Image (tube, rainbow, N blue to C red):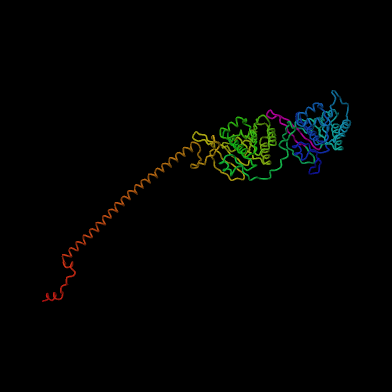
Amino acid sequence: MSGSETGQSKRPTGIAGLDNVTRGGLPAGQATLVLGEAAAGKTVLGLQVLANAVDRGEGAVFVTFEESPAQIRRDAASFSWGEALIASTSWQLIDARPHFGVEAAGAFDIEGLLSVVASAAETMQTSWLVFDGIDQLLQYQPDQRSAIEQVRRLDAYCAEHGWTLLLTGKATDERVTPAGLEGIEFLLSATLVLSARMVNQQLNRSLRIAKYRGSGHCADELPMLIDGEGIQLPYHEPAPDGGGVASDERLSTGIERLDKLLGGGIYRGASLLISGRPGTAKSTLAGHFAQAAAARGERTLYVSFDELEAPYVRNLASVGIDLRTPIDAGLVRFQDLAAYTARVTEHFLVLRRMIDDFDPRCLVIDPISALLKASATEGAHTATEQLIDLARRRGITTVLTSLSSEDDPEGEATQGQVSTLADGWIVLDYNIRSGERNRALSIVKSRGTAHSNQQRELLLSDAGIDLADVYEYGSEVLMGTARANREAEEDAAAQRRERERQQRRVDLERRLEQADQERQRLAAELALEQDQVSEADRAEATRRDTIQQRRDPDQDNPSAPAPDDTSHDEGQSS
């Protein structure tokens, strides 16, 4: 037994989700009323609680007022815990069905029944009693007051012996009391209401804690499943330990250029959403991620709601992605599911069990938006939120794909509002120009990471996926043929400019050559001019010398005596 915050003693049921929402179990030593319509799971709940008690080494007694003991055993045998329960000697099954044709004559009490139960309980360390279909017995009471008094007596008797009692009864329209027993809900400490209704031609079960006196509890209507393991409350099982450490390790997407745009890759334990319209390569990107994880030696669980394994693996091989090898090696587990065949809650439970069984480091769900095809009262958003939370707490790196919302022409809204939950979000779209459709990739968000805000062309080839460099033309980013044409135009213009530069260079070199030739000509002319000037100077000097000699013949004979200037002068004077 366990105690609540108020000190109330509780006894765990062994059903993880139920013990979680009741904060520890049902009130120990008291009666709990379990109501529901046909097929809601009342008998299964009682049997499963007893099976868990027996497994813990406790004793239990099951009293049936409707089904035969043989049928009760057949019911139990259909579950995984049924065989062990049937084989155990720690519980006893008592047939308390009224005989056929019995008629009541006045009021009666249940002292005799309690004596039988007490005798059976004394032989075992009994902690649980189940009275299945108590309304079938109490309907023979002459009035409502007498029936309620018997329930009061039963509750007091169990409290005296420390037995925890489950009383099951029929109710319709989500009433919290069996027909003819109005007021019993005020008497007992706890009431569980089980319901079963059809949604989109599928049976949807739920559980609601209508009352739990003196204890905190979840008052919502909780989706409930019954499968081979018994009753499950998938969304309300205790959260796994962990989730408090944020890793700085980056994991590759398998595409080098995309890793650079994401600041090095995806944080370990984070979630990445890839959304887009059909045919934009969402599954191909997810396959690249799975291949990269397997190359690192990490187990990857790949869940596909759209494709079967064989054609998917074949299609990925056409773009250079090999998943067959890691699948055969056991590093990748591929699980194909059909969304429309089960409820959202059932899909969530299947996924959680696969995660428990395979213990992956990486998880791919392709596409998560397929859950919208499944029927449910709670919606696909709840399942998606629970999956992402489960993966985060276990440190599983998750990649989800999703179709874009039909109401969003820009492609930046996802079905089921998955984009609000993921840590990162990549949008794939088509860039349609001049009659050509090209794939484009952009990063809308990446928590904790500086990332590119530009749209890039996504290229698919035999070698895999690649991203083209951003090619801006004015205010546009060109892709496909438009980009090729523009690149060709720029290449032609560049070649033209190069030819023009070469021509200008040739012209300049020719002009330089011509100038050099002119320089040489002028230099020769200058030299000739200088020679001519020198020759002229020499001729002039010679001419002057000749004239001088003619004027003064003796100048050439400097040894001759000079004439007597004085006598000459005197002769002239006389």
User: Residue 559: horizontal and vertical position, in percent?
Assistant: 18, 70
Tell me where residue 534 sits by quadrant.
bottom left
User: Residue 552: horizontal and vertical position, in percent?
Assistant: 16, 67
- Residue 559 visible from this viewpoint: yes
Q: Is residue 435 left or right of residue 323?
A: left
Q: As rendered, which of 217 and 238 lies closer to the eye? A: 238
Magenta stretch contains residue 200: yes
Q: Is residue 191 left or right of residue 529?
A: right
- Residue 420 visible from this viewpoint: no
Magenta stretch contains residue 338: no
Q: Residue furthest top?
A: 101
Q: Is residue 184 left or right of residue 246?
A: right
User: Residue 106: horizontal and vertical position, in percent?
Assistant: 88, 28
Give the magenta range: 189-210
Q: Is residue 419 left or right of residue 153?
A: left
Tell me where residue 345 sits by quadrant.
top right
Tell me where residue 136 sits by quadrant.
top right
Q: As rendered, which of 183 and 497 lies closer to the eye? A: 497
